[in-house]
Image (tube, rainbow, N blue to C red):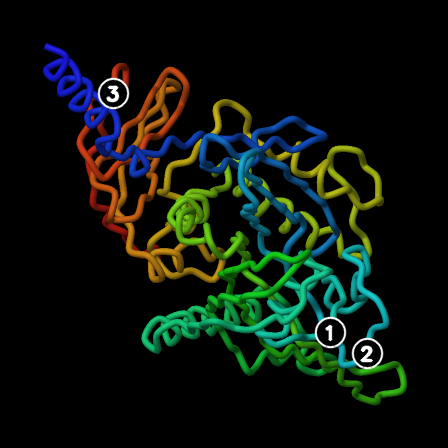
Amino acid sequence: MIKKFLYFCLIFCNILVLPVKSEEASKIFKFEIINEPKSKIEFARVLLPQDFNLNYNIFWIRNLEAPVLLSVSAVSNNRDIKFFYSSKITFSDNGRQLDSFKLSDIDSLSKITKQNFQTIQDYVLKFIKKENPSAQNIQILSSQYCQKDIKEYLTEEMYKKIENLKLNTKTDIKSSKIDIINPNVEPYTVTYKFEKDGKKYKQTVITMLNSLDFEYTKKTKYNIFEKNKRKIWTVTGLYSYCAEIDIYDEYYNDFIIFAANTAFNQKAYESIELVKKQMLVELNPIYRDVHTNSPLKNMPSELFRRYYKGGLANYSEDKTSPMQKPSLEQIRWYVNIIEPLNSYKLKNLRGIGNQIIYIPKKFKYIYYSPVNNYITVDTNKNKLSGNIKLKQTKIKYIDKK
Protein backbone atom coordinates (compact mmCIF):
# COMPACT_ATOMS: atom_id res chain seq x y z
CA MET A 1 0.00 0.00 0.00
CA ILE A 2 2.83 2.35 0.93
CA LYS A 3 4.63 1.43 -2.29
CA LYS A 4 1.49 2.29 -4.29
CA PHE A 5 1.19 5.60 -2.46
CA LEU A 6 4.86 6.47 -3.13
CA TYR A 7 4.45 5.44 -6.79
CA PHE A 8 1.42 7.73 -7.08
CA CYS A 9 3.36 10.60 -5.49
CA LEU A 10 6.22 10.07 -7.94
CA ILE A 11 3.86 10.19 -10.90
CA PHE A 12 2.18 13.32 -9.49
CA CYS A 13 5.52 15.07 -9.02
CA ASN A 14 6.53 14.17 -12.57
CA ILE A 15 3.31 15.70 -13.86
CA LEU A 16 4.12 18.90 -11.99
CA VAL A 17 7.52 19.23 -13.65
CA LEU A 18 6.40 18.24 -17.14
CA PRO A 19 7.07 21.06 -19.62
CA VAL A 20 3.99 23.26 -20.04
CA LYS A 21 3.08 24.62 -23.47
CA SER A 22 4.84 27.95 -23.82
CA GLU A 23 2.68 31.04 -24.16
CA GLU A 24 5.58 33.23 -25.22
CA ALA A 25 4.39 33.11 -28.83
CA SER A 26 1.20 34.93 -27.85
CA LYS A 27 1.60 38.68 -27.26
CA ILE A 28 -0.85 41.47 -26.59
CA PHE A 29 -0.43 44.92 -28.14
CA LYS A 30 -2.27 48.14 -27.35
CA PHE A 31 -3.03 51.22 -29.42
CA GLU A 32 -1.70 54.43 -27.87
CA ILE A 33 -3.01 57.78 -29.07
CA ILE A 34 -0.82 60.87 -29.51
CA ASN A 35 -2.56 64.23 -29.07
CA GLU A 36 -1.24 67.62 -30.18
CA PRO A 37 -0.70 69.35 -26.80
CA LYS A 38 -2.11 72.82 -27.60
CA SER A 39 -5.20 71.86 -29.59
CA LYS A 40 -5.72 68.37 -28.06
CA ILE A 41 -6.30 67.11 -31.61
CA GLU A 42 -5.53 63.43 -32.22
CA PHE A 43 -2.27 63.57 -34.12
CA ALA A 44 -1.05 60.00 -34.50
CA ARG A 45 -1.14 56.53 -32.96
CA VAL A 46 1.27 53.71 -32.25
CA LEU A 47 0.89 49.99 -31.57
CA LEU A 48 2.91 48.90 -28.53
CA PRO A 49 3.43 45.76 -26.42
CA GLN A 50 1.05 45.83 -23.48
CA ASP A 51 3.80 46.40 -20.88
CA PHE A 52 5.35 49.44 -22.60
CA ASN A 53 4.94 53.09 -21.57
CA LEU A 54 4.74 55.86 -24.17
CA ASN A 55 6.31 59.35 -24.16
CA TYR A 56 6.22 61.83 -27.01
CA ASN A 57 7.01 65.41 -28.03
CA ILE A 58 5.52 67.56 -30.78
CA PHE A 59 7.64 70.55 -31.80
CA TRP A 60 6.33 73.20 -34.25
CA ILE A 61 8.85 75.19 -36.33
CA ARG A 62 8.68 77.66 -39.22
CA ASN A 63 10.25 75.13 -41.58
CA LEU A 64 8.63 75.24 -45.03
CA GLU A 65 9.34 71.57 -45.71
CA ALA A 66 8.71 70.10 -42.24
CA PRO A 67 6.79 72.47 -39.92
CA VAL A 68 6.32 69.85 -37.21
CA LEU A 69 8.57 67.24 -35.62
CA LEU A 70 7.08 64.29 -33.73
CA SER A 71 9.36 62.17 -31.57
CA VAL A 72 8.11 59.05 -29.78
CA SER A 73 9.83 56.84 -27.22
CA ALA A 74 8.38 53.62 -25.78
CA VAL A 75 10.04 51.89 -22.84
CA SER A 76 9.30 48.50 -21.28
CA ASN A 77 8.22 48.42 -17.63
CA ASN A 78 10.04 45.14 -17.05
CA ARG A 79 13.10 45.01 -19.30
CA ASP A 80 15.88 47.32 -20.49
CA ILE A 81 14.30 48.00 -23.90
CA LYS A 82 13.52 51.19 -25.81
CA PHE A 83 11.70 51.85 -29.11
CA PHE A 84 12.06 55.29 -30.71
CA TYR A 85 10.52 57.10 -33.67
CA SER A 86 11.18 60.54 -35.15
CA SER A 87 9.16 62.01 -38.02
CA LYS A 88 10.48 63.71 -41.14
CA ILE A 89 12.79 66.71 -40.73
CA THR A 90 14.43 68.80 -43.48
CA PHE A 91 17.64 70.83 -43.28
CA SER A 92 19.42 73.47 -45.37
CA ASP A 93 23.23 73.53 -45.68
CA ASN A 94 24.75 76.72 -47.12
CA GLY A 95 28.30 75.38 -47.01
CA ARG A 96 29.35 77.34 -43.92
CA GLN A 97 30.39 75.42 -40.82
CA LEU A 98 27.92 75.74 -37.93
CA ASP A 99 29.18 75.73 -34.36
CA SER A 100 25.82 74.66 -32.94
CA PHE A 101 22.43 73.43 -34.14
CA LYS A 102 18.94 74.53 -33.10
CA LEU A 103 15.67 73.58 -34.78
CA SER A 104 14.62 77.23 -34.58
CA ASP A 105 17.60 78.45 -36.66
CA ILE A 106 16.02 79.03 -40.09
CA ASP A 107 18.00 79.76 -43.27
CA SER A 108 16.95 83.13 -44.74
CA LEU A 109 16.99 81.93 -48.35
CA SER A 110 15.36 78.50 -48.23
CA LYS A 111 13.26 79.09 -45.05
CA ILE A 112 14.41 75.69 -43.79
CA THR A 113 16.26 74.77 -40.58
CA LYS A 114 20.03 75.24 -40.88
CA GLN A 115 22.24 72.20 -40.33
CA ASN A 116 25.45 71.04 -41.99
CA PHE A 117 24.97 68.06 -44.31
CA GLN A 118 25.88 64.63 -42.98
CA THR A 119 26.05 61.28 -44.70
CA ILE A 120 23.44 58.79 -43.59
CA GLN A 121 26.10 56.79 -41.73
CA ASP A 122 27.32 59.88 -39.85
CA TYR A 123 23.77 60.94 -39.00
CA VAL A 124 22.91 57.53 -37.54
CA LEU A 125 26.16 57.31 -35.55
CA LYS A 126 25.52 60.78 -34.13
CA PHE A 127 22.03 59.64 -33.13
CA ILE A 128 23.43 56.52 -31.41
CA LYS A 129 25.87 58.65 -29.40
CA LYS A 130 23.18 61.18 -28.49
CA GLU A 131 20.83 58.43 -27.26
CA ASN A 132 23.65 56.71 -25.32
CA PRO A 133 26.16 59.36 -24.18
CA SER A 134 28.14 56.88 -22.08
CA ALA A 135 28.34 54.22 -24.82
CA GLN A 136 31.76 52.68 -25.44
CA ASN A 137 33.26 50.32 -28.04
CA ILE A 138 30.57 51.14 -30.63
CA GLN A 139 30.80 48.67 -33.54
CA ILE A 140 28.66 47.97 -36.61
CA LEU A 141 27.28 44.41 -36.64
CA SER A 142 25.43 44.69 -39.97
CA SER A 143 24.17 47.31 -42.42
CA GLN A 144 21.85 47.15 -45.40
CA TYR A 145 21.02 49.55 -48.22
CA CYS A 146 17.85 49.29 -50.27
CA GLN A 147 17.91 47.23 -53.45
CA LYS A 148 18.77 48.94 -56.71
CA ASP A 149 15.33 48.86 -58.37
CA ILE A 150 13.61 50.54 -55.41
CA LYS A 151 16.32 53.20 -55.19
CA GLU A 152 15.88 53.91 -58.91
CA TYR A 153 12.12 54.24 -58.41
CA LEU A 154 12.61 56.68 -55.51
CA THR A 155 15.15 58.70 -57.50
CA GLU A 156 12.59 59.00 -60.29
CA GLU A 157 10.12 60.28 -57.70
CA MET A 158 12.73 62.85 -56.70
CA TYR A 159 12.94 64.10 -60.27
CA LYS A 160 9.15 64.51 -60.31
CA LYS A 161 9.39 66.48 -57.09
CA ILE A 162 12.06 68.71 -58.64
CA GLU A 163 9.81 69.48 -61.60
CA ASN A 164 6.97 70.42 -59.26
CA LEU A 165 9.30 72.68 -57.29
CA LYS A 166 10.35 74.46 -60.48
CA LEU A 167 6.73 74.95 -61.54
CA ASN A 168 5.64 76.23 -58.13
CA THR A 169 8.61 78.57 -57.75
CA LYS A 170 8.05 81.40 -60.20
CA THR A 171 11.21 83.06 -61.48
CA ASP A 172 11.98 85.69 -64.08
CA ILE A 173 14.85 84.37 -66.19
CA LYS A 174 16.00 87.98 -66.77
CA SER A 175 16.43 88.69 -63.09
CA SER A 176 16.49 85.34 -61.31
CA LYS A 177 16.89 81.63 -61.97
CA ILE A 178 16.55 78.43 -59.95
CA ASP A 179 18.40 75.18 -60.68
CA ILE A 180 17.69 72.00 -58.68
CA ILE A 181 20.18 69.20 -59.37
CA ASN A 182 21.90 66.08 -57.97
CA PRO A 183 18.96 64.22 -56.38
CA ASN A 184 19.91 61.32 -54.14
CA VAL A 185 17.85 58.87 -52.05
CA GLU A 186 19.29 56.37 -49.55
CA PRO A 187 17.06 54.03 -47.50
CA TYR A 188 19.23 52.42 -44.84
CA THR A 189 19.19 50.10 -41.84
CA VAL A 190 22.10 49.39 -39.51
CA THR A 191 22.67 47.43 -36.29
CA TYR A 192 25.32 48.44 -33.76
CA LYS A 193 26.62 46.88 -30.58
CA PHE A 194 28.12 48.84 -27.71
CA GLU A 195 28.81 48.74 -23.98
CA LYS A 196 27.18 51.03 -21.43
CA ASP A 197 27.25 50.97 -17.63
CA GLY A 198 28.83 47.50 -17.65
CA LYS A 199 26.15 46.01 -19.96
CA LYS A 200 26.22 45.01 -23.64
CA TYR A 201 23.57 46.41 -26.00
CA LYS A 202 22.38 46.09 -29.59
CA GLN A 203 20.69 48.97 -31.38
CA THR A 204 19.04 48.88 -34.79
CA VAL A 205 18.17 52.03 -36.73
CA ILE A 206 15.92 52.24 -39.81
CA THR A 207 15.93 55.51 -41.73
CA MET A 208 16.14 57.18 -45.15
CA LEU A 209 17.99 60.27 -46.29
CA ASN A 210 17.35 62.19 -49.49
CA SER A 211 19.07 65.31 -50.75
CA LEU A 212 19.28 67.73 -53.66
CA ASP A 213 21.31 70.82 -54.56
CA PHE A 214 19.38 74.09 -54.80
CA GLU A 215 21.02 76.94 -56.75
CA TYR A 216 19.37 80.37 -56.78
CA THR A 217 20.76 83.06 -59.09
CA LYS A 218 19.41 86.61 -58.86
CA LYS A 219 20.34 89.96 -60.35
CA THR A 220 21.38 92.60 -57.82
CA LYS A 221 20.62 96.31 -58.14
CA TYR A 222 24.03 96.80 -59.73
CA ASN A 223 23.17 94.43 -62.62
CA ILE A 224 25.45 91.74 -61.21
CA PHE A 225 24.23 88.16 -60.97
CA GLU A 226 24.70 86.59 -57.54
CA LYS A 227 24.50 82.82 -57.06
CA ASN A 228 23.48 81.20 -53.80
CA LYS A 229 23.79 77.46 -53.23
CA ARG A 230 22.07 75.23 -50.72
CA LYS A 231 22.02 71.50 -50.14
CA ILE A 232 18.52 70.59 -49.02
CA TRP A 233 18.54 67.26 -47.19
CA THR A 234 15.78 65.34 -45.47
CA VAL A 235 15.78 62.57 -42.91
CA THR A 236 12.51 60.88 -43.85
CA GLY A 237 11.73 59.43 -40.45
CA LEU A 238 13.86 57.31 -38.13
CA TYR A 239 13.05 54.18 -36.12
CA SER A 240 15.32 52.82 -33.42
CA TYR A 241 15.34 49.68 -31.26
CA CYS A 242 17.79 49.33 -28.37
CA ALA A 243 17.98 46.38 -25.95
CA GLU A 244 20.49 44.32 -24.03
CA ILE A 245 22.05 41.78 -26.37
CA ASP A 246 20.64 38.77 -24.48
CA ILE A 247 17.00 39.83 -24.99
CA TYR A 248 17.32 41.65 -28.32
CA ASP A 249 15.93 38.81 -30.45
CA GLU A 250 13.00 38.26 -28.07
CA TYR A 251 11.58 41.72 -28.74
CA TYR A 252 12.69 42.23 -32.35
CA ASN A 253 9.26 41.42 -33.83
CA ASP A 254 7.62 43.71 -31.28
CA PHE A 255 9.77 46.53 -32.64
CA ILE A 256 8.81 45.66 -36.22
CA ILE A 257 5.11 45.85 -35.26
CA PHE A 258 5.75 49.22 -33.57
CA ALA A 259 7.56 50.59 -36.65
CA ALA A 260 5.07 49.23 -39.18
CA ASN A 261 2.01 50.58 -37.35
CA THR A 262 3.16 54.02 -36.18
CA ALA A 263 0.92 56.27 -38.30
CA PHE A 264 -0.34 59.84 -38.54
CA ASN A 265 -4.03 60.58 -38.29
CA GLN A 266 -4.82 61.21 -41.95
CA LYS A 267 -6.72 64.41 -41.17
CA ALA A 268 -3.68 65.69 -39.27
CA TYR A 269 -1.44 64.81 -42.22
CA GLU A 270 -3.68 66.74 -44.63
CA SER A 271 -3.75 69.72 -42.26
CA ILE A 272 0.06 69.77 -42.11
CA GLU A 273 0.17 69.94 -45.92
CA LEU A 274 -2.16 72.97 -45.80
CA VAL A 275 0.05 74.55 -43.13
CA LYS A 276 3.04 74.25 -45.49
CA LYS A 277 1.12 75.91 -48.33
CA GLN A 278 -0.02 78.78 -46.12
CA MET A 279 3.51 79.34 -44.81
CA LEU A 280 4.66 79.66 -48.43
CA VAL A 281 1.91 82.24 -49.10
CA GLU A 282 3.04 84.25 -46.06
CA LEU A 283 6.47 84.80 -47.65
CA ASN A 284 4.87 87.35 -50.01
CA PRO A 285 5.94 90.87 -48.89
CA ILE A 286 2.39 92.22 -49.32
CA TYR A 287 0.75 89.31 -47.48
CA ARG A 288 -2.20 90.00 -45.17
CA ASP A 289 -4.06 87.24 -43.32
CA VAL A 290 -7.63 86.89 -44.64
CA HIS A 291 -8.90 85.94 -41.17
CA THR A 292 -7.27 88.73 -39.14
CA ASN A 293 -6.31 91.29 -41.84
CA SER A 294 -2.88 91.31 -40.22
CA PRO A 295 0.48 91.17 -42.04
CA LEU A 296 1.94 89.11 -39.17
CA LYS A 297 2.87 85.51 -39.91
CA ASN A 298 0.87 82.79 -38.17
CA MET A 299 2.37 80.20 -35.86
CA PRO A 300 2.35 76.77 -37.57
CA SER A 301 0.47 75.30 -34.60
CA GLU A 302 -2.28 77.93 -34.98
CA LEU A 303 -2.56 77.20 -38.70
CA PHE A 304 -2.84 73.51 -37.91
CA ARG A 305 -5.78 74.15 -35.60
CA ARG A 306 -7.40 76.35 -38.27
CA TYR A 307 -7.15 73.75 -41.03
CA TYR A 308 -8.02 70.61 -39.07
CA LYS A 309 -11.39 69.29 -40.26
CA GLY A 310 -12.54 67.89 -36.93
CA GLY A 311 -14.57 64.77 -36.29
CA LEU A 312 -13.23 61.27 -35.74
CA ALA A 313 -9.60 60.47 -36.49
CA ASN A 314 -8.93 58.55 -39.69
CA TYR A 315 -6.18 55.96 -40.17
CA SER A 316 -7.29 54.54 -43.52
CA GLU A 317 -4.77 54.34 -46.36
CA ASP A 318 -6.52 55.79 -49.37
CA LYS A 319 -5.01 59.29 -49.15
CA THR A 320 -1.62 59.39 -47.44
CA SER A 321 1.43 57.54 -48.70
CA PRO A 322 0.59 53.83 -48.31
CA MET A 323 2.66 51.66 -46.06
CA GLN A 324 3.82 49.04 -48.57
CA LYS A 325 4.59 51.33 -51.48
CA PRO A 326 7.99 53.09 -51.59
CA SER A 327 7.55 56.77 -50.80
CA LEU A 328 9.67 59.88 -50.29
CA GLU A 329 7.32 61.12 -47.58
CA GLN A 330 7.76 58.35 -44.99
CA ILE A 331 9.94 55.34 -44.22
CA ARG A 332 7.39 52.81 -42.85
CA TRP A 333 7.34 50.86 -46.12
CA TYR A 334 11.02 49.95 -45.66
CA VAL A 335 10.12 47.84 -42.62
CA ASN A 336 8.40 45.40 -45.00
CA ILE A 337 11.67 45.00 -46.92
CA ILE A 338 13.55 44.09 -43.74
CA GLU A 339 10.87 41.79 -42.30
CA PRO A 340 8.08 40.69 -44.71
CA LEU A 341 4.65 41.54 -43.32
CA ASN A 342 1.05 40.47 -43.77
CA SER A 343 -1.70 43.09 -43.77
CA TYR A 344 -5.02 42.87 -41.93
CA LYS A 345 -8.08 45.06 -42.26
CA LEU A 346 -9.31 46.53 -39.01
CA LYS A 347 -12.68 48.14 -38.27
CA ASN A 348 -13.01 49.34 -34.71
CA LEU A 349 -16.00 50.37 -32.61
CA ARG A 350 -15.90 53.91 -33.97
CA GLY A 351 -16.85 52.49 -37.36
CA ILE A 352 -13.91 53.83 -39.37
CA GLY A 353 -13.14 51.23 -41.99
CA ASN A 354 -10.21 50.79 -44.36
CA GLN A 355 -7.71 50.75 -41.52
CA ILE A 356 -4.82 48.37 -42.07
CA ILE A 357 -2.42 46.90 -39.53
CA TYR A 358 0.79 45.04 -40.37
CA ILE A 359 2.15 41.98 -38.60
CA PRO A 360 5.27 39.84 -39.40
CA LYS A 361 4.39 36.73 -41.42
CA LYS A 362 5.56 34.34 -38.69
CA PHE A 363 2.39 35.19 -36.73
CA LYS A 364 -0.53 33.36 -38.38
CA TYR A 365 -3.34 34.27 -36.00
CA ILE A 366 -4.30 37.87 -35.29
CA TYR A 367 -7.11 38.79 -32.91
CA TYR A 368 -8.73 42.14 -32.16
CA SER A 369 -10.60 43.09 -29.00
CA PRO A 370 -13.08 45.90 -29.80
CA VAL A 371 -13.74 46.44 -26.10
CA ASN A 372 -10.23 47.45 -24.99
CA ASN A 373 -8.75 48.07 -28.48
CA TYR A 374 -6.08 45.37 -28.04
CA ILE A 375 -4.39 43.28 -30.73
CA THR A 376 -3.24 39.75 -29.89
CA VAL A 377 -0.71 38.07 -32.19
CA ASP A 378 -0.03 34.34 -31.99
CA THR A 379 1.73 31.54 -33.86
CA ASN A 380 -0.94 29.11 -32.59
CA LYS A 381 -4.69 29.08 -32.99
CA ASN A 382 -6.49 30.10 -29.81
CA LYS A 383 -10.08 30.92 -28.94
CA LEU A 384 -10.07 34.29 -27.22
CA SER A 385 -13.36 35.32 -25.65
CA GLY A 386 -14.70 38.62 -26.99
CA ASN A 387 -12.01 38.84 -29.70
CA ILE A 388 -12.44 38.96 -33.47
CA LYS A 389 -10.06 36.90 -35.60
CA LEU A 390 -8.73 39.19 -38.34
CA LYS A 391 -8.44 37.97 -41.90
CA GLN A 392 -5.42 38.67 -44.05
CA THR A 393 -6.14 41.20 -46.79
CA LYS A 394 -4.48 42.21 -50.04
CA ILE A 395 -4.05 45.87 -50.94
CA LYS A 396 -4.13 47.16 -54.50
CA TYR A 397 -2.40 50.52 -54.78
CA ILE A 398 -3.39 52.77 -57.68
CA ASP A 399 -0.97 55.43 -58.83
CA LYS A 400 -2.48 58.90 -58.84
CA LYS A 401 -1.69 60.89 -61.94
**Mark 2: few/some/many CA within 10 Å (<14, 14-19, 20+):** few
Relative placement, left or right, of 313 versus 14 is right
Kind of element beneath mark 2: loop
Looking at the rendered image, the quarter that the N terminus falls into is top left
Q: Residue at x 63, y 67 (%)?
A: 169
Q: Which residue is mark 2?
A: 97
Kind of element beneath mark 1: loop
Q: Which residue is mark 3?
A: 384
Which residue of the protein is positioned furthest toward the front in this rendering? 2
Relative placement, left or right, of 115 versus 319 is right
- Which one is closest to the eye, mark 3 or mark 1? 3
**CA distance separating discs 2 and 1:** 7 Å
Check residue 230 in the rendering and tell me which mark sits there, or answer none: none
**Amino acid residing under circle 2:** Gln
Closest to the observer, 150 or 119: 119
**CA distance separating discs 3 and 2:** 59 Å
